[in-house]
Image: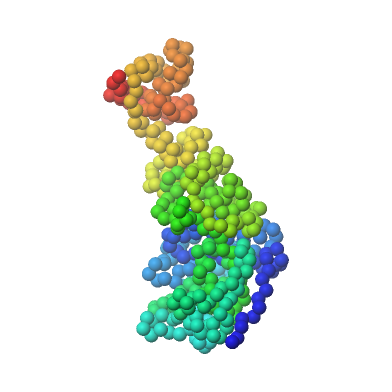
Amino acid sequence: MEKPPTEKFTTPEDDNKKLVFRVGMSPTESNKKIGPIRSHLYNYAFAKGEAAKGKDSTVIFRVDDTDKEKHTKEKAKEIYLFFTETLGFEFDVTPDNSQEKIGQSVFQSERQDVYSKYLDELFDKQVAFLDKESGLVLFDIKKFIEQYSDSLEIEDLLRGKIKLKLEENLRRGQLFFPLVRSDKSVLYHLSSVIDDATFGVTHVVRGQDKLPVTDFQEMVRVSLGLEPKKYLHTPMLLGQGGELLKGVVKFDDFIRKGIVPHALISYMISSGYGNPEAIYSSLDEFIKDFDYKKIHKNNGQFDSNKLDDINKKIIRKVSPEVYFSSILLYLSKNGEDQFSEFLKDQELKSILISLRRNPEESYEMLKTIFNPQYEKIDTEMSDVVKILLEALDKSTDSIPTPESLGLEKKELFNGLRWILVGRSIFPNIDQIFNYLSHKGFLRSRIKLTKQSLSRNISNP
């Protein structure tokens, strides 16, 4: 029985050679889920962190688009833009520059000729065969064991050496695994191994859920005599009962609920890396001191309360422009583009930035400023409102003083809030007063208040 050669593995600290990482991305919505994104974050940070240390480190964006029915170029572009524009990833090799950078396409759908040469070699070695009934090309696990070994070993940077016992596949009835579909398009176990070899990939960083397929890919690699890679299998983010996350778990789902991107990124990082209480206000801040040894080994549980807490803190930490862009993103994801047009007004933009509420609250405030829905008030408050309306009828140049109207300061401002936004509680009402006054909206708001007053007084 021919045994695979003993392979030496080194850590990044010992390795002065070129380091190549790849983000293998299937162009489907599943790659916008927070679980896969977290693995991609660690992958990307590892690559960029090594580069920041002065090493020759490259990260490639690869498009795993071999399924003709599910994958389209339009979807691939959407996923790429999501990772670059929304998450802020800066890939070294992209779908646009791959020919220039590495002399080949990163679209697996365009690499069938490359795969066919390696497939022929697997046929020649009699570990691959065409199943005439299904039309699939299958890899024969038993033949591999007979020709090479009944076990393989990989080095995982986080877990050390992992022994792959191949006969366990046979015991559970897994005699073969597919390499090529009946339409002749190549499947992941073959295409991924070949791409890694031809791209010069040295490190594969991915979620623990991919560990079960590692033995398939390693059998293909050994059969083809290709160089080994260093693996790092990251922990998964699971539900409270240890189950896979389901339901509202896509990045955009959280954005629609008012979570800002930086808060979500920070939570995805700290929930499986280093100090779980750490907050990262930018991706660069995380990358700067990244150490793969700080990635947790155990899976974690998604904690919505923790995410909400980080969201509140991040909103206060990020720059005004980053905060404002999160509001625009929230409006876009919720189909409220007309409010994005309103926010071209610099005064209104400044008000929202000064308030620093989460995007959902900012949106509700916007609606209230432009179209107040007057809440019920008691007769005591209505008397205050009447006094204020009488004063504002005379002059809207400034907010009257409490002393001039014989009111307490709290009474005056509660009444003013109700006149301007229909609520007795609202932040920075003096800013709203100045804005409406400057824009010439104050007189119409006073008129609207008078119309609403009688029908919004609650009965004792």
**Which picture quadrant has residue 298?**
bottom right
Query: Is the residue 309 above or below the residue 76 in the image?
Result: above
**Which corner quadrant holds the C terminus?**
top left
What residue is at 53 percent from the left and 77 percent from the top?
A: 166
Where is residue 162 shown, x and y percent of the image? 59, 69
Of 102 and 288, the residue lying toward us? 288
**Which corner quadrant holds the N terminus?**
bottom right
Where is residue 352 shown, x and y percent of the image? 48, 36
Question: Number of callouts in the render?
Answer: 0
Where is residue 365 shown, x and y percent of the image? 42, 35
Query: Is the residue 377 above or below the residue 182 in the image?
Result: above
Query: Is the residue 433 above or below the residue 18 in the image?
Result: above
Where is residue 387 shown, x and y percent of the image? 38, 15
Residue 71 placement, left or right of 456: right
User: Is residue 349 something that shows in the picture?
Assistant: no
Of 436 and 286, the residue lying toward us? 286
What residue is at 53 percent from the left and 67 percent from the top?
A: 211
**Colour mapping used in the image:** rainbow
What residue is at 38 percent from the left and 85 percent from the top?
A: 132
What residue is at 53 percent from the left and 52 percent from the top?
A: 268
Residue 315 placement, left or right of 12: left
Residue 76 placement, left or right of 458: right
Of 312 and 436, the residue lying toward us? 312
Query: Is the residue 88 above or below the residue 110 in the image?
Result: above
**Which picture quadrant has residue 293?**
bottom right
User: Is residue 15 something that shows in the picture?
Assistant: yes
